[in-house]
């Protein structure tokens, strides 16, 4: 193998590792975990309310407000992957949009927006949640 080939391969390997596994530091990982743990309760409550179609209930609004609050904490966390930070920002936008739809009390629009929000949760979990 020529030297330039070795250098080329090494660079490629390093770049791939960066792309695939930009792991957060331990303290960042702990912060993410604690925010996500606090999203669990509102998530479960919202699932139940969705099943009962209680999209315009006070409970639905209060639990979305809890997600808004926790996602604000997510925005303070700086992950080494730009995509992760972008997903937190996008989720924030969708949650704020949800608050305006809730204010308008339009169950159909709220239901649709809840679907959008869940897509952001799943999208990030697919890439960054281990297990
Ligand atoms: C920007 C990325 C990202 C977004 C967006 C995101 N999550 Fe997470 N979530 C994670 C990661 C990473 C973990 C794994 C954390 C760990 O346990 O180390 C996780 C774990 C969780 C867990 C398990 C927590 C536990 O008990 O260990 C719940 C519940 C959860 N997320 C709910 C949500 C909900 C609900 C949303 C959307 C409203 C959401 N997440 C959006 C990244 C994200």
Image (cartoon, rainbow, N blue to C red):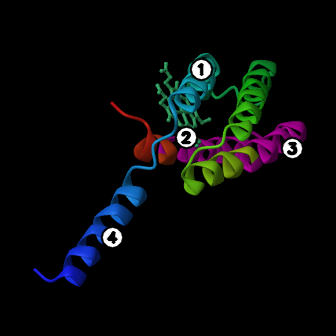
The magenta span reads 93-122
- 1 or 3: mark nearer the eye: 1
| Mark 1, residue position | 34
Q: Nearer the viewer, residue 38 or 25?
A: 25
* Contact (Cβ within 8 Å) of mark 1 with mark 3: no
Indicate the secondary structure of the residue bearing disc 1. helix
- Say if 116 sits above or below 5 in the image: above
**Horizontal and vertical percent position of residue 81:** 54, 52
| Label 2 within 8 A of ligand 1 by Cβ | yes
The residue lying toward the viewer, choosing from 57 and 39, is 39
Mark 2 burial class by Cα count in 10 Å: few <14, some 14-19, many 20+: few
Q: Is residue 118 above or below residue 53?
A: below
CA separation, marks 1 and 2? 16 Å
Q: Is residue 5 magenta?
A: no
In the rendering, which numbered label is found on residue 121? Answer: 2
Mark 4: which secondary structure?
Answer: helix
Kindly identify which numbered label has been placed on residue 11: 4
Q: Quadrant location of the C terminus?
A: top left
Secondary structure of the magenta portion, mostly? helix
The Cα atoms of the two marked residues, 3 and 2, are separated by 20 Å
SS class, disc 2: helix
């Amino acid at each position: 193998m020529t030297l330039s080939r070795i250098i080329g391969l090494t660079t490629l390997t390093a770049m791939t590792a960066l792309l695939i596994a930009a792991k957060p530091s331990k303290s960042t990982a702990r912060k993410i975990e604690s925010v996500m743990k606090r999203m669990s309760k509102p998530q479960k409550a919202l699932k139940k309310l969705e099943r009962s179609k209680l999209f315009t209930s006070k409970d639905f609004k209060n639990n979305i407000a809890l997600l808004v609050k926790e996602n604000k904490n997510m925005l303070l966390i700086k992950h080494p992957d730009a995509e992760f930070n972008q997903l937190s920002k996008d989720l924030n936008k969708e949650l704020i949009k949800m608050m305006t739809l809730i204010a308008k009390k339009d169950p159909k629009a709220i239901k649709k927006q809840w679907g959008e929000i869940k897509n952001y949760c799943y999208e990030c979990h697919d890439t960054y949640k281990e297990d």
